[in-house]
Amino acid sequence: MATNINLFTDKEATNWFKACIALNVTKEGLTNFLEKELQKVHSVVGTSCGKCCIEKLIKCPTLKYCKKTKGNNCIFHKSQQPQHCQICDKVKQNIVTLHRYGGPSWRNTHAENWAHDYWEIGKCFLPLDGYSSVSSVQESDFNGVISIMLNCLHFQTCLSSACISPPPPDDACLLEKVRQIGRVVRHTSDCKVTDADLQEYFQTLSTLLVDPNCLQHDPSSTIACARLRDLQNDRLSIKELGDLLKEAYRTLVLAKEAGERFSLEAERTLEQVTKAGERRLKSATHAGQQRLKIKTKVGESTYLRTSH
Ligand SMILES: [Zn+2]
Ligand SMILES: [Zn+2]
């Protein structure tokens, strides 16, 4: 049963809400691809010793990390002093080399887990702060997923040039455009998106999801692409819409935990809408179930009649 997303009387507010859902759908569509590629990155950077934490591997003082207190103690190196480890230093250097801007986000990563957890390597390519406790690609938000693809040079080998040329940080780069959609939607001051902008968002996000290099052949990405089309044409089922609403709300909660900045307006609207939407969907589903029950009963009695 398809349903229209008419949670607002205002068309442009509905558009904004669709854009929020589209970002979530896109992130879901990229998750499998990202996990697979990060496992390759993991094997490329080599195996660490498994004992060194990141504080040990960063010399003191290091800009943006170290901060001396009055007693001349560094806050970052409070619990662990820098110590040379040939094995881990090599892995660390490989991560730096793979970083487009040469500045991995060390604060997010747990280096002692580098040896067995590819996600801890992936986290080095996230924005500088706020993802330390995010434990998987699945748990990461849209901005995190796109940041990894932008910052880690490995993705140049598994995305076509249509996605990464001109290279980031050029605004004309498709991946940069994708990231920008996320920013505009999150930081909105009025929670509205014009029809023309929404069409462009769908177009840009879909272009990424059907990238001929790998994503076109990725089942999750294909599903996401079909979902975007359904969302664009108001063809989502009640069940799907309900799930997406829940997911959109969960993302908001997680993003808030990660210190991600949503505009106050965006946060408030998303919270209200997901709650109101869930209520409406529940009653719609309830009505649907009632209809189904009646139909089944009618069917049963018909069966009883005909079988006698
Ligand atoms: Zn080590
Ligand atoms: Zn320090």
Image (cartoon, rainbow, N blue to C red):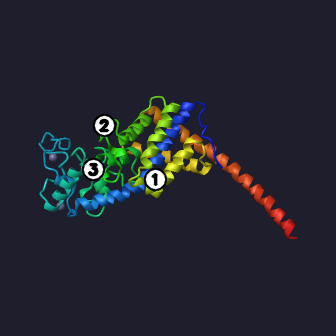
Q: Are marks 1 and 3 in contact (CB under 8 Å)?
A: no
Which quadrant holds residue 187?
Answer: top left
User: In front here: 128 or 211?
Assistant: 211
Q: On the image, which quarter does residue 255 sit in?
A: top left
* Residue at (44% x, 41% y) in the render: 204
In the image, is residue 65 above or below residue 115?
A: above
> Mark 1: which amino acid?
Ser
Kindly identify which numbered label has been placed on residue 153: 3
Residue at 46% from the left image edge and 38% from the top image edge: 201
Amino acid at dot 2: Asp
Query: Does the beta carbon of the residue at mark 3 sit less than 8 Å from ligand 1?
Result: no
In the foreground, 42 or 84: 42
- The answer to whether 169 appears left or right of 4 in the picture is left
Residue occupied by mark 1: 221
- Rendering coords of residue 306 (x, y %): 86, 67
Query: Where's residue 57, x and y in %?
Result: 17, 54
* Dot 1 alpha-carbon crowd within 10 angstroms: few under 14, some 14 to 19, many 20 or more: many
Ligand 1: quadrant of the figure = bottom left
Q: Is residue 154 above or below residue 201?
A: below
Q: Is residue 176 left or right of residue 48?
A: right
Which element carries disc 3, helix, strand or loop?
A: helix
Q: Earlier in the sequence, mark 2 or mark 3?
A: 3
Q: CA distance from mark 2 to mark 3?
A: 15 Å
Residue at horizontal 37 percent and vertical 41 percent from the top: 174
- Please give the label number shown on residue 170: 2
